[in-house]
Amino acid sequence: MRRRALVLGGLVLVGAAALGFTIERPRGYGVTIDYRQLLAGPPAPNSAAAVADRAALAGATAAIGGPRWQQAGRQVFPSGPAVTAEIACAAGVDVAASPAAGRLVARAVSDLSRPVEAAKSAFRRNRPYVGAPDTRTCDPRTLGAVGGSTGGVLSYSYPSGHAAQGRLVAAVLGAAVPARAAALAAWGDRLGDNRVACRVHWPSDVAAGRKLGDAVFAALQADPAFRADLAAARVELARAPIASNCKAG
């Protein structure tokens, strides 16, 4: 069956579809990581991290409707044209012109999906808007159910799938276009930060997601198939058209 996107916990993931491809449901590289060795779980009530989480939620609530809120809304569906354009501008080239890059990203994200989903199911942390006086989010799929239902699928908050993928996709593409690694890393981190602005994640969720993204990328370095795909993507992206309609800075 052909798919336009990967789905994890109700979230459309950044993958080959975000780069403008329609490909077969991807097979990962077989990289496995144990989230239990990386994540301590959500912060304890009244801990410094929990206080910081609540402060960030208050700040996000005060900024509803602002520029970050609006950008976060455009990033809800990473298979959409807004995120595709963001990735191209960060990479400096039309990434969608490279089928090899699409395969590379899709397979890496497939390996990431398992530990992210396992951690969400284990920790079962409610999303910030659940039970809050103000339940608004920038994500039209949020229904306010226990845990945070998105699109009818129960999707817990810890860790953030968007943050995990932002970190991983940025690292993978940064390895393929080394001159743009810093710009891609900034894009990936912004994708995670904006989930806090959207009021669907706590900052500690975002930090946990980034740990998983980093761990999967580190594990991929030793995989021969990943290295071969990366080499192919480098060749194609070096020949890809320059990204257009990008804002300065």
Image (spheres, rainbow, N blue to C red):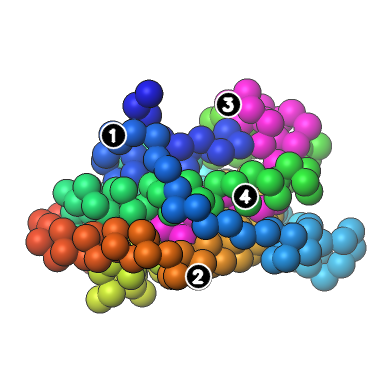
Callout 4, which amino acid? Val
Q: Is residue 64 left or right of residue 80?
A: right
Q: Nearer the observer, disc 3 or disc 1?
A: 1
Q: Nearer the observer, disc 4 or disc 3?
A: 4
Label 2 vs 4, first from the N-terminus: 4
Residue interval drawn in magenta = 143-170
Q: Which residue is mark 1?
A: 22
Residue depicted at x 15% and y 55%: 244
Residue 15 x %, y %: 39, 46
Label 3 vs 1, first from the N-terminus: 1
Label 4 vs 1, first from the N-terminus: 1
Rounded to the nearest whole Å, what is the CA distance between mark 2 and mark 4?
A: 16 Å
Callout 3, which amino acid? Gly
Label 1 vs 2, first from the N-terminus: 1
Q: Which residue is mark 2?
A: 218
> With respect to residue 185, does 84 lie above or below?
above
The foreground one among 14 and 98 is: 98
Callout 1, which amino acid? Thr
Label 2 vs 3, first from the N-terminus: 3
Q: Considering the numbered disc 3 on the image, is that residue within a helix, a strand or a loop?
A: loop
Q: Which residue is mark 4?
A: 116
Residue depicted at x 69% and y 58%: 35
Q: Nearer the observer, disc 1 or disc 2?
A: 2
Residue depicted at x 34% and y 27%: 2
Rounded to the nearest whole Å, what is the CA distance between mark 4 and mark 3?
A: 18 Å
Q: Which residue is mark 3?
A: 151
